[in-house]
Image: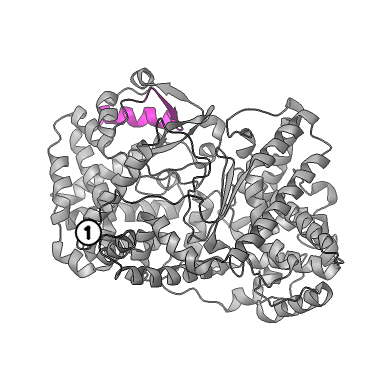
Amino acid sequence: MLALPLTHSMAHAAETSLAAVKKESGMDTSVAPGDDFYRYVNGGWLKNVAIPDHKVAVGNFDSLIEQSDTKVLKLIEQATTAAPGSPVRKVGDFYSAHLNIDAINQRGLAPLQGEMQSISALQDKTSLATYLGKHLRADVDPLNTANIFTENLFGLWVAQGFHDHKKYMPYLLQGGLGLANREYYLSRSPKMVELRKNYLAYIAGTLKLADVPDAEQAAKRVFDLEMAIAKGHTNREATSDVMQADNTWSMADFHKKARGLDWKAYFKAAGLDGQEKFIIWHPSALKASSTLVANTALASWQDYLRFHVINQRVNVLPQAFFEQKFKFYSALTGAKAPQPRWKYAVSATNEALGEEVGKLYVAENFSPEAKTRVNGMVTNLLTAFGERVQALKWMTPATKQEALAKIKATYVGVGYPDKWRDYSGLSVDVNDAYGNNERVQEFAYRRALAKFGQPVDATEWCMNPQLVNAVNMPMQNAINFPAAYLQSPNFDLNASDATNYGALGATIGHEISHSFDNSGSMFDAKGELRNWWSKADMAYFKTSSKALIAQFNQYQAFPDLAVNGAQTLGENIADLAGLMAAYDAYHASMKQKGQAITKEDDKEFFLSYAYSWRRKMRDETLRTVIITNEHAPVQYRVLTVRNLDAWYDAFAVQPGHKQYLAPKDRVKIW
């Protein structure tokens, strides 16, 4: 969306905003909107913009991240002079330690020695299980942030139970890979074959830097073990199917269903031996990896652990490690140069002390007026979505009541959390970047374990206020909109309703709609996994979903790679239902103000939507996104408009235009 100083006289506002869009936004009006709407709105900009060497993409989203990082940097630098021992000073000290590459270089390999000695001291598979359990971390979140990657053999998530919203449960997920997911290991694509060769060389180079003997042979053992782990992994599409994740195991089940790992030793070391039940997101992967523990030589596991100890800590090790990792991963992303050191330091500080930084951020960058206005938009969007549910002809009354109950019970956090996280138990040393990194991970892990036996907090946030993003948390039946996302060009206090609802309104609708996508729709108003659908309703929903899958499967980004409509289904449903609800809410807002709605207003709404997705990405990164991400690339997300009748009316899209869909082919779910 554009941050335009529009008046509240909508006839004039629409004219002014559309003129500004054409002049300033980089449209390509030589393209008919019905032939390529994304290029019609963004084509001029796409032709002229260059991606800086240290970036993999540029666009509105990236600009907002730059703005947030710059503001946070200023706040953190101020924190370096705060009172010693204060919570704010912890922020400054953590950043300073991470930024001080000279001190990190001077310490050399010394910080690694403790871990390396522990690995060398492993005598048998029981001590291996103890080591693996000791290093389990709460570093995954498959539902809220869709973070399913961990280099540890397994990942832990602590959240309310699938079938008991009042009780926290431990969830175990697959892990153990250095590359993003199993496709990087198993794909026969020439690009992937070449990437695997480079990855093997990277492992060897890393082990050489750490003075590991016979680094090439050790690297081969590491790679072979990762390949075996990958073969046992569940693919990305199946991981997104929450029904496949509903597997409750008792402690005894581990010994029966996943033999090979000494689970007693593992859970004791992990501090989880007191837990009676676990939910296993990837049972087949857990079984396969456990078998590998038993059947793979201890020496191979030791090489594997040495590499991953280093690979996970590159940013707090000497610069040579960082440079080597960047050289390899730049081939994945296309980045030609690393970002400035302060960028990595800010990112690490946000991750370590995110809500402490968030307090500073919102105090200076998020006004009460903005919070009030956004809350009003949220109310309108919830109402609009509820009205859409009420109007559904295909849904039975009983199912409608369940859906409406979910909408009514939704918690929406705007800007920042109601309660701030307490970091008083975290020790930070301005002279010890490596130690700070270890203590942060252990602190987060202890915090996760401390939830067991406590009341579930449905208002807890999983994103920092300074993060440019938004999230739906289906088990909490909650939505968060961080303050950093709620700024121009996503939201502007001075912009028209058409502009604000086309950009931010669509995002609000998107997050609400996640409660009713292929995954969210499996949870009820309490956040419990329960089928509240009639058979006929679910059949209709699945049929409509298949049509959306087919629509996105047609989008071919490269000759050898297309969008995976099943993998991206949840996000595509949310885009579709969210945009429809945003359109309704924008019309309702105009009517509430007694303002007439013109065709130009509708144009502005859709222009704002397409503009909000403006982004240019390197081909290497685009490939990674298509293979690994649950979101379709932005140019295809914009094509959601093809399913809205109002878009055809606004831009006179007719049969013969390339992106025209006959009315019967326009997907409508909610």
Answer with the quarter of the image where residue 598 lies: bottom right
Look at the image and tell me in which quarter the C terminus lies. top right
Q: Residue at x 29, y 51 (%)?
A: 426
Q: Residue at x 49, y 71 (%)?
A: 67
Mark 1 residue type: Asp
Relative side of 110 to 287, left or right: left
Look at the image and tell me in which quarter the N terminus lies. bottom right
- Asked if residue 539 is positioned above or below residue 208 in the image, the reply reads above
Report crowding for label 1: few under 14, some 14 to 19, many 20 or more residues within 10 A (C-alpha): some
Whether residue 336 is visible here, answered yes or no, is no
- Picture coordinates of residue 376 (x, y %)? 69, 57
Q: Outermost residue toward the bottom?
A: 23
Relative side of 380 to 57, left or right: right
Q: How many marks?
A: 1
- Picture coordinates of residue 74 (x, y %)? 39, 73
The colouring scheme, among rainbow, by chain, secondary structure or one colour, is: one colour
Whether residue 455 is visible here, answered yes or no, is yes
Relative side of 132 to 44, left or right: left
Which residue, given by chain and number where applicable, does mark 1 sit on?
A: 429
- Picture coordinates of residue 236 (x, y %)? 50, 42
Q: Nearer the viewer, residue 190 or 468?
A: 468
- Picture coordinates of residue 312 (x, y %)? 29, 51
Q: Magenta stretch: residue 294 in it?
A: yes
In magenta, the rendered stretch is: 274-297
Q: Nearer the viewer, residue 440 or 425?
A: 425
Q: Secondary structure at mark 1?
A: loop
